[in-house]
Amino acid sequence: MKQASSQNQPERESESVTAVPEEVMVTVDKQIAQAGGPLEEPEEYKGSIARTMFDTASSNDGTVTVLLSRARLEELPRQSLVRIKSTDKRSYLGVVVSGPFAEPDGLRADSPMLVAVAVNGALMTPKFHGRVQVELIGEELEDAVVPPRRRPLPNSPVFVLPGEETSRVLKLEGEIRIGLTESHEDVEVRVPAKKAVWPRHVGILGTTGAGKSTTVSGQIAQLQKANFATVILDIEGEYTEINKPTDDANMSRALKRRGLEPAGIPNTQLYHLVGRETRNPDHPNLKEFSLQFSDLSPHAVIEILDLSEAQQERFLKAYDITKTAMEKLKIFPADQNERQQLLELDELQEGYPRMTLTHLYDVVKYITAQVAKDEQDPILETPEFRKNPDILKQSMGKVPGDPRSWYVIVGRLNRIKRLGIFDIKKAQINYAELLGPGRVSIVDLSDTDSPQVNNLVIAQLLRGIQEQQETNYVAATKKKQPPTPAMIFIEEAHEFLSASRIRQMPVLFEQVARIARRGRKRWLGLAFITQLPQHLPDEVLGLINNWILHKISDAQVVARLRKSIGGIDESLWSRLPALAPGQAVVSFTSMGRALQTAIDPTPCRLLLVD
């Protein structure tokens, strides 16, 4: 019986696949024709790649769930822009903030069957589809995009925006290229070189090795092409060879993939302090510079020397005696015009004209000798004071006693005097040349090995640049032209503007804040670069308008930045700790929204720092 059953089985299988009778198919065709013909995709759905989904109890009011077929899963990467044409005739713009995720059809992704299949290594993949979460940007009207008041209805068609339209919607047009969006290889992230964007104040933050130097050097190259004057305060000497093309093999390959070529930045000049070395002694336009003591506010000098309250009183007394002696000797003011200049002097911003560090040092030495009742007067270095010691005695008046505080001031002034970096006439900076169109100036501070000296240099340079930019602005306004825009890049900004230093040096910070406030109106911007953003106080973060955020791993730092920086959505903040070198979250005032960006490789040579 079993054998007979086995012999009859092929006959039954053959009968089970008998062709459908022709008259049945004719009947079906007639019924289709009577119903209006084969189903065709509605006109409003043509070209769409996905559909909106029904909302669930866990739906977020700001996002919409969008489903797409397996075949189109890769067409909606994160940060893609989409247009949703709701079935109620409304049109919405949105951005993919998470996904695309692959989900099985008709099953839960964590269903026991799928788990068992995966665990046991079986080669079975069920049919699946894609899901993305889209955050609504706005509702499209005839002539504007307004905040959405409603949500797209379910099963509405979703269209991906092409690269050109994505750039327009996100406002990525401009002369300064930063990189490419992570979602579109053909969408460049650009910002305009105009007063409201560049130059405005920029924060470039990230851990060591995240790509800040690449970003900075690339932006300097772009700004030069836009005819900016650029100054970089280079603490480590990384940028001293940017006049040469990169010789890094990995960087060259990355440039080639972007259609770019290695190239040095032309029209650069390299400054270093007198008596100090530079990391690039072969630079074709190498210049020494010295600090001018008369450019420094006495209150800023007090902060940098870290004087106690009693020492501050004596320092300011000596400063006033020096001014009196200089006036009696007609060193300054020497005529009526200079007397008028004296009336306008603001010692919170600048020092006394023509006063040198040696002038003040001589006076402090002389006062100390008098207070200590030394048998002999000290040897004075200033020719005018050496020839006229009685002038100093006449100018002294009554001074505080106790020579111990005076000895401290003598020692600290002597310490910075021995550096040999002050008041060398042949090494003065020509600020008009520094701020010439297309000029790139690197100030190499790698050999100072002293935060105090660096702070003195930065304080003087910022003030000198601000004054020159004020002059340039007035001259350009008279000609009814915009001035040459200028950007100052401050490397290792946490060393200059940390919370502890601001508490110790409020006058110096106020100078920076004043430059920041006035600079925006004068086409002068500051870029703060640091690997330790946790040391930047809220006062500094409040000055910054634009951000390039590389990898930041510290959760507390990220949480603090989230409170200080607006316009960056949650999905981007969550990715910040995992960004690869060369990736950054970019947020500029000109952009429609912040974007994760693949920063362009630098075309110029950078010196690695150990």
Image (cartoon, rainbow, N blue to C red):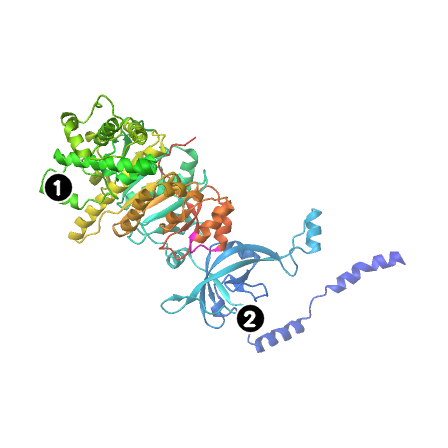
Magenta stretch: give its range: 564-569
Q: Quadrant of residue 279?
A: top left
Disc 2 packing (10 Å; few <14; some 14–19; many ≥20): few
Marks 1 and 2, how far apart in space?
A: 91 Å
Q: Residue furthest bottom?
A: 34
Q: Which residue is mark 2?
A: 39
147 vs 92, nearest the viewer: 147
Q: Is residue 178 above or below residue 460?
A: below
Which one is in front in this view, the residue at disc 1 or the one at disc 2? 1
266 vs 360, nearest the viewer: 360
Q: Is residue 166 above or below residue 548?
A: below
Q: x and y percent of residue 349 in the render?
A: 25, 43
Q: Which residue is mark 1?
A: 338
Residue 300 colored magenta? no
Q: Is residue 589 visible?
A: yes
Q: x and y percent of residue 118 in the render?
A: 68, 49
Q: x and y percent of residue 115 in the render?
A: 69, 52
Amino acid type at circle 1 is: Glu
